[in-house]
Amino acid sequence: MQDDSLSGLVRNRRQVRLETFVRLRWLAITGQSVAVVGAQFGLGLSLPFGWCFLVIAASSWLNLALRIRFPASYRLSDESAALLLAFDILQLAALLFLTGGLQNPFSLLFLAPVLISATALPPERTLSLGLLAVGLSTILALVHRPLPWFADGRIELPFLYVSGVWTAILLGTAFTGVYAWRVAEETRQLSQALAATELVLAREQHLSQLDGLAAAAAHELGTPLGTIMVITKELVRQLGPNAPPGLAEDLNLLREQADRCRSILSKLTSLGSDEAGFLATVTFSHIVEELVAPQRSLGPSIDVSTAGEGPEPVCRRNPGVMFGLANILDNAADFAESRVVVRARWTSDSVSIEVRDDGPGFPNEVLLRAGEPYVTTRAPQSQREGDAAGAGLGLGLFIAKTLIERSGAQMSLSNAAGTGVSGAIVKVVWSRSAFERGASPATLPEMASRQPLTVPPVAPI
């Protein structure tokens, strides 16, 4: 279900509300009306006034029809939005035809619909609208009514100037379209990736809260279970040695099962207990072991090395950090040829964990864009061998980096260097104060004094 949610986030396009288009068109209608009225009556230019306002009225009628037909919150499909923007381009072209074509300085407004499309629609829709705008501007450069001038005069600008305006529209459409689409796409991807990160983090937090729910359930079930045990003991005492064999066996079985339930409830209670501290405050070596344990029986061999200077660091268990580190280790196990090495180190100032594998290493595009969303790496080992599973969404590394760096860590990616050496290296480093932030002060001396799970150093990959 989690993967389906992330896929939905990736597939989802940002559909624009109809209300946005309607308001923008009302703004354009107002500007066009003011320009026509000002030119006709303010400057005394001889315009085809009636035809101009008929073209403007067409936009007004379309706006009124859309407002009556659809609610303000209605979201347009890509096709509908592209058609509305195409209408705006055609309407502007009709006005320019009546008022001088590309000799009219307002001809640069051809860029506006293309810019809006670039921020809200897929690239192919923007390309179609850009070609429409350029095509109509080409026609207007050759066919148009004369540019009105003072005292019933007319002006014809040199064709070289008109060609320059046409070139400006062409280049402006291409540049602003690509630039706006790129900026909007990065913003959209970042927004979707952050939403996916929040989804994953919320899921991990819910899992970490199960210990509290278990403790509450144990507390609620403790009273009826105690009553069952008391009644069972009383029945056994009243029946004594003369009880029927079958009934005595049933009572003994009921008593054993009640004792078992009490033991289970005791364990559940300890999960939510701060004094137990297993899920709340843990040592660094236990964090490493918890990460490595699920991978030991799968895929390549996992070599662990933990060592440090001074007392072992203790931290508050962070579900987001655990998810991020597990994601890194999963990737290393997927892409390794035969071996993964996990190095855990600490000093009085810092705590670090390094995961390296002996696979092909990170592609250059991943190293250059480390931490950006939707950077898809190579296919995992199972897919390279012909597995039909779909490729990832390119969010794993982004989510891991985001969750880990929220805890105050710095994550770096690199490839192993040396002759005949290959593999990816991911290193996460905390300052010791940031790593131990939130750990229960009462448990720090006790847990730090325990013997760490130290593993002898392993040979380098």
Image (cartoon, rainbow, N blue to C red):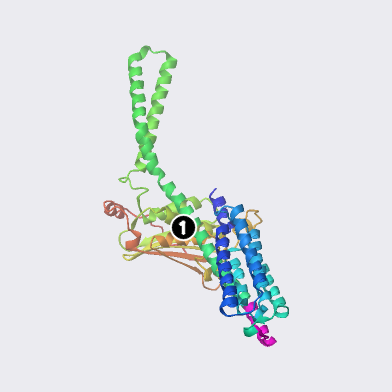
Give percent across and percent down for residue 50.
66, 70
- Residue 458's image quarter? bottom left
Mark 1 lies on residue: 324
Query: Which is more toward the observer, 141 or 113?
Result: 141
Q: Can residue 24 be spotted in the picture?
A: yes
Give left or right: position of 308 versus 388: left
Q: Which residues are magenta?
A: 152-171
| Residue 278: image location, x then y, percent | 36, 47
User: Magenta includes 156?
Assistant: yes
Q: Horizontal placement of 184 versus 212: left or right?
A: right
The picture places residue 174, in percent across and down from the top left corner, at: 63, 75
| Amino acid type of the residue tagged 1 in the rendering | Gly
Q: Does any portion of residue 340 appear in the rendered image?
A: no
Q: From the viewer's perspective, tell me whether residue 245 is left or right of residue 12.
A: left
Q: Is residue 232 above or below residue 416?
A: above
In the image, is residue 275 above or below residue 314?
A: above
Q: Residue at x 66, y 67 (%)?
A: 54
Residue under the image location 26 percent in, 51 percent down: 442
Q: How many marks?
A: 1
Is 8 left, or right, of 141 in this rendering? left
**As drawn, which residue projects farthest toward the top?**
242
Residue 119 or residue 91, whichever sits in front: 91
Kindly indicate the quadrant of the structure image that contains residue 230.
Answer: top left
Between 24 and 454, the residue placed more toward the observer is 24
For the stretch drawn in magenta, the main secondary structure is helix
Q: Would you say residue 15 sits in the magenta stretch?
A: no
Using a 10 Å C-alpha cutoff, classify the residue at mark 1 as few (fewer than 14 neighbours), some (14 to 19) or many (20 or more): many
User: At which x and y percent is residue 375?
Assistant: 55, 64
Q: Quadrant of residue 166?
A: bottom right
> Label 1's element?
helix
